[in-house]
Amino acid sequence: MGEVAIVTGASSGIGRALAVELAREGYRVGLIARRADRLDALAAQIRDEGGRAECVPAGVTGRDEIQRAIAGLTERLGPVDLLVANAGIALGTDALVPAADALEAEFRVNVFGVFYAIEAVVPSMRERGGGHVVVISSLAAHRGLPGAAGYCASKAALTRLVEGLRPDWARAGIHATTVHPGYVRSEMTERNRFRMPLLMDTDRAARLIAGAIRRKRKVYEFPWRMSLLVRYLVRHLPDRVLASLVRRDRERPEQL
């Protein structure tokens, strides 16, 4: 009959592609996102391919809303075996005109929205003695970047959050995977006005993440060359050099 997977942020990008991939692997898939029309279209696609999918429109920033959505999907599909907390936003941070609104929104979605979903599934996983929580963080968690300080900080917070939860989950039989993608084609990256090294197709990214889920990797980073670049070069660049590189990319007319 297949295990049950719930994917947040399923209406586009990595979430959409990963939901399709998991359904093809035999999961009964629960879809959560704000845009009901896109969720309906995705569920129809999965069913047309012979899979099982149910959807509930909901935003991840409302604690009660996301818990009701997951409860509704559980009633239709069964207890959650796999949670993919994928929903995320990037709004940009202006260092010289500081404003808290964007930063608060990024943390509400990228950190608290993930934790609300975790809160809704982990007690049941603990009772059943197993489960798997996957969070989609970012390679940006490794270094604060000019113009994206809030996004980087929220993804770093998410990575450290799961890192701290993982040991106790393991004792309860619950696996945890933190995914650090590089640049992946999506509505979010389409807004970028700078060069994105090693930009990856969304479907390929979904296949790689699905493979990491099967192997129950604790941390999975891709593309591997981008991971090395960030970990061993970008992370240690002096501020002035990094700022100069980012500014140069933003000013390239061919990127506009």
Image: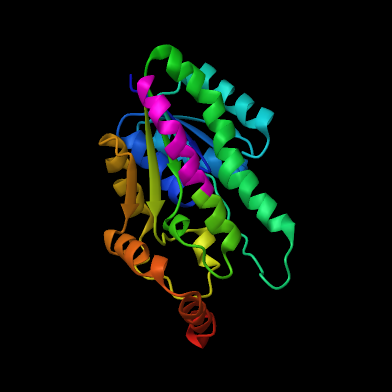
Residue 73 lies, in percent from the top left, at 53, 24
Residue 135 lies, in percent from the top left, at 45, 41
Kindly give the residue lying farthest to the top in the view shown.
127
From this view, report whether residue 256 is shown above or below residue 211.
below
* Front residue (pair 160, 87): 160
Magenta: main secondary structure equals: helix
Question: The N terminus lies in which quarter of the figure?
Answer: top left
Q: Residue at the spot x=33%, y=60% of the render?
A: 227
* Front residue (pair 210, 232): 232
Residue 150 lies, in percent from the top left, at 60, 58
Q: Residue at the spot x=62%, y=48% of the render?
A: 107
For residue 50, which quarter of the picture?
Answer: top left
Residue 223 lies, in percent from the top left, at 31, 59
Q: Magenta segment, which residues?
A: 157-172
User: For residue 4: magenta?
Assistant: no
From this view, report whether residue 240 is shown above or below residue 43.
below
Q: Residue at the spot x=74%, y=62% of the render?
A: 99
User: For residue 166: magenta?
Assistant: yes
Q: Residue at the spot x=44%, y=54% of the render?
A: 138
Q: From this viewpoint, is residue 192 visible? A: yes
Q: Would residue 248 appear left or right of 134 to someone viewing this image?
A: right
Question: The C terminus lies in which quarter of the figure?
Answer: bottom right
Q: Would residue 164 appear left or right of 99 to someone viewing this image?
A: left
From this view, report whether residue 243 is shown above or below residue 155.
below
For residue 142, which quarter of the picture?
Answer: bottom left
